[in-house]
Image: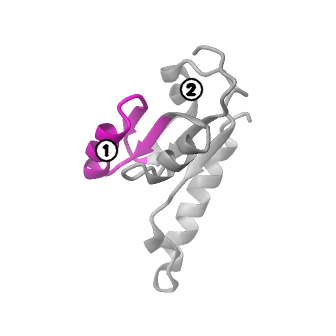
Amino acid sequence: MKASSEPIAIDIFSGAGGLSLGFETAGFRVVQAIDNSRYAAATYRQNHPHVDFIESDIQRIDHGECLKRIGLSPGALTVLIAGPPCQGFSESNRRTGRLIILLICYFANSFDF
């Protein structure tokens, strides 16, 4: 990946790309997005054709493969954006919310910022 003065971001639980759009507007270069919803994937790809999109469950993603796929070296990532589904954080669904938080922490710890 070419050197850039822009801060670099990866968007996990990206959905249709609202957070990616906000970060791009703020001057970040979003280089990759991950979501397991085929509907979100179709919308994201339409709205952000320049971003490498991985349609997969976050639990099945290898962070090294993510970086290799886009040619990003360890330490080059500025921010990991995460917009997890809000249902997991509701009072009626505490178990799933904890799982989502653990997944985000695990994935974030895999990258060398």
In the image, taking residue 76 as reference, residue 20 lies left or right, namely left
How many other residues sit within 10 Å of disc 2, few (<14), some (14-19) or many (≥20)? some
State the residue at coordinates (37%, 42%): 56
Q: Is residue 55 magenta?
A: yes
Disc 1 residue type (three-letter): Ala
* Residue 15 in view here: yes
State the residue at coordinates (69%, 44%): 109
Marks 1, 2: nearer the viewer: 1
State the residue at coordinates (59%, 54%): 104
Name above or below for residue 40 compared with residue 2.
Answer: below
State the residue at coordinates (67%, 33%): 7
* Residue 107 in view here: no
Query: Which residue is more in the foreground, 62 or 25?
Result: 25
In the image, taking residue 3 as reference, residue 50 lies left or right, namely left
Q: Residue furthest bottom?
A: 92
In the image, taking residue 92 as reference, residue 76 lies left or right, namely right
Q: Which residues are magenta?
A: 32-57
Pointer 2: what residue? 67
Question: Of the numbered discs in the image, which one, if any, rests on residue 41?
Answer: 1
Name above or below for residue 48 compared with residue 4.
Answer: below
Task: Where is residue 90? Give x, y as percent.
Answer: 50, 80
Quarter-of-image position of residue 87 = bottom left
Question: Of the numbered discs in the image, which one, if any, rests on residue 72?
Answer: none
Query: Which residue is more in the foreground, 31 or 64?
Result: 31
Name above or below for residue 86 compared with residue 111.
Answer: below
Label 1 vs 2, first from the N-terminus: 1
Quarter-of-image position of residue 52 = top left
Q: Residue furthest top?
A: 2
Q: Secondary structure at mark 2?
A: helix
Q: Is residue 36 magenta?
A: yes
How many other residues sit within 10 Å of disc 1, few (<14), some (14-19) or many (≥20)? many
